[in-house]
Image: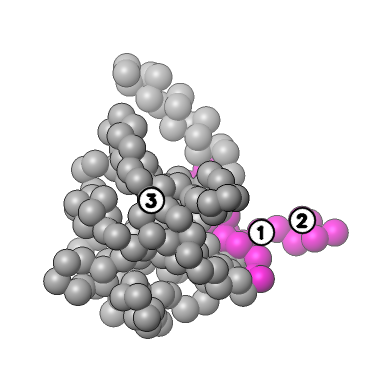
């Protein structure tokens, strides 16, 4: 793909507002890992499936693509700092947030609007990313307004959406 096409693609996609998630799992040595992801969508109601994608160059790529279980945290409007934390490099992300280990061994972060506890259903190659499809096994719904991503900025849903 040429540079101009890539620039236009990024601009158009950056102008598409999305919600923001943090995906977590556990490394083979038991270490909790997680990352900020906005490439998240529902796939199916029966069975209940979701998908997200991970760049093949990300340091956590092998851990997530081999994980049997993971959790999708739909971030709440007041979790912008958490979003930035899990997008950062070179720090212990879990040392800087409130979390606990679930009964099935997946780190669960406090305060999200919702958490989808998933088993990995399948993975599919997609260019420079891998698409991970998860089967939702359990749902925590805290009914908070979500965090939004638009034009490389994160913020709470505007009050005008509730008028």
Tag 2 secondary structure = helix
Q: Residue 1, image x and y in percent?
A: 32, 18
Q: Which label is found at residue 157?
A: 1
Circle 3 crowding by C-alpha within 10 Å: few under 14, some 14–19, many from 20: some
Q: Residue at x 62, y 74 (%)?
A: 142
Front in this rendered view, residue 95 or 132:
132
Q: Residue 112, image x and y in percent?
A: 53, 71
Q: Residue 132, image x and y in percent?
A: 36, 47
| Viewport quadrant of the C terminus | bottom right
- Magenta part of the protein: which range? 143-163
**Which residue is most to the front?**
46
Tag 3 residue: 121
What's the distance in space between the residues labelled 2 and 3, CA to CA? 35 Å
Tag 2 residue: 161
Question: How many numbered tags mark residues here?
Answer: 3
Q: Residue at x 36, y 63 (%)?
A: 70
What's the distance in space between the residues labelled 1 and 2, CA to CA? 7 Å
The answer to whether residue 81 is left or right of residue 132 is right
- Describe the colour scheme in one phrase: one colour
What's the distance in space between the residues labelled 1 and 3, CA to CA? 31 Å
Query: Is residue 85 among the parts visible in the rendering?
Result: yes
The part of the image, by quadrant, that contains residue 86 is: bottom left
The residue mark sitting in front, 1 or 3, is 3
Circle 1 crowding by C-alpha within 10 Å: few under 14, some 14–19, many from 20: some
The part of the image, by quadrant, that contains residue 91 is: bottom left
For the residues bearing labels 1 and 2, Cβ distance under 8 angstroms: yes
For the residues bearing labels 1 and 3, Cβ distance under 8 angstroms: no
Tag 1 secondary structure = loop
Front in this rendered view, residue 13 or 29:
29
């Amino acid at each position: 793909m040429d540079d101009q096409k890539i620039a236009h693609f990024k601009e158009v996609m950056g102008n598409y507002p999305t919600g923001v998630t943090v995906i977590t799992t556990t490394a083979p040595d038991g270490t909790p890992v997680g990352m900020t992801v906005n490439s998240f969508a529902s796939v199916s109601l029966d069975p209940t499936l979701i998908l997200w994608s991970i760049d093949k160059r990300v340091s956590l790529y092998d851990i997530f693509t081999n994980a049997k279980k993971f959790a999708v945290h739909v971030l709440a409007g007041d979790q912008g700092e958490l979003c930035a934390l899990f997008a950062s490099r070179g720090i212990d992300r879990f040392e800087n947030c409130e979390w606990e280990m679930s009964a099935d061994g997946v780190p669960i972060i406090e305060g999200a609007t919702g958490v989808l506890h998933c088993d990995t259903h399948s993975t599919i190659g997609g260019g420079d990313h891998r698409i991970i499809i998860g089967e939702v096994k359990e749902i925590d719904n805290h009914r908070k307004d979500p965090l939004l991503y638009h034009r490389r900025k994160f913020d709470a849903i505007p009050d005008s959406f509730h008028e």
